[in-house]
Amino acid sequence: QVQLQESDPGLVKPSETLSLTCAVSGYSISSGYYWGWIRQPPGKGLEWIGSIYHSGSTYYNPSFKSRVTILVETSKNQFSLKLHSVTAADTAVYYCARHGSNAFDIWGQGTMVTVSS
Amino acid sequence: EMVMTQSPATLSVSPGERATLSCRASQSISNYLAWYQQKPGQAPRLLIYGASTRATGVPARFSGSGSGTEFTLTISSLQSEDFALYYCQHYNDWPLLTFGGGTKVEI
């Protein structure tokens, strides 16, 4: 079955760049679907960060647009998130997930990222 | 800007009872709405899409209804494993996706 697995950066220092990778197994990214990133600060709700289409087209939440980059690496069947100039407010569980023209149907288990010096 | 408002924030029910969760959109979203269940320490799980279509493997006690701006998730007879957080999410305004604030279903 299709599985998604986020990498585990753990601790990131303020003002630095948060980098995450989502490895996809059981499905070829280049075959279709959108591949997205969602985050959840401790004790709070879900926030969509952005998505990338299998062709490489990117779509970002305007709240993050100036400091987010999502890339796809079809040769490795994975996609990545870079969030620049992080602050403590970026501390959250980060999820990668697959979606079509509708909902997020398959999610990774999530990875906790803490921004702290 | 689309705003999704869920109510109540917390719903206290007993096992076997019916639970009704509400999600309101600030603008009409037709039926472009999904519902998710999230248990502590786990990723969200898709329950409903298209406002009323159950995702694969979702028990029949979960049902969704509504269109336009008012939506409902109903759990007909709560089981112990149903106590969790529930989120709605619209996808009418692609490429912008927004989640509601969530409803916690507790005993």
Image (cartoon, grey):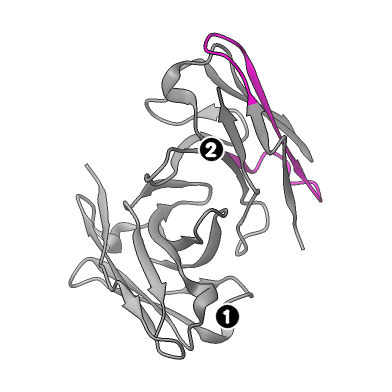
* Picture quarter with the N terminus of chain A: top left
* CB under 8 Å between discs 1 and 2: no
Residue B31 position, x and y percent, is 68, 38
Instruction: Establish if A92 lies above or below B32.
Output: below
- Quarter of the figure with residue A117: bottom left
| Magenta stretch, residue numbers | B12-34
- Quarter of the figure with residue B51: top right
Q: Amino acid at mark 2?
A: Leu
* Residue B85: mark in rendering: 2
Based on the picture, tell me whether residue A28 belongs to the magenta stretch: no
Residue A65 position, x and y percent, is 57, 80
Residue B20 position, x and y percent, is 67, 23
Q: Residue at label 1?
A: A65
Say what secondary structure mark 2 lies in.
strand
A94 lies left or right of B16: left
Q: Can residue B47 be seen in this snapshot?
A: yes
Distance of label 1 from label 2 (alpha carbons): 28 Å
Q: Which of the chains bears the disc numbered 2? A: B
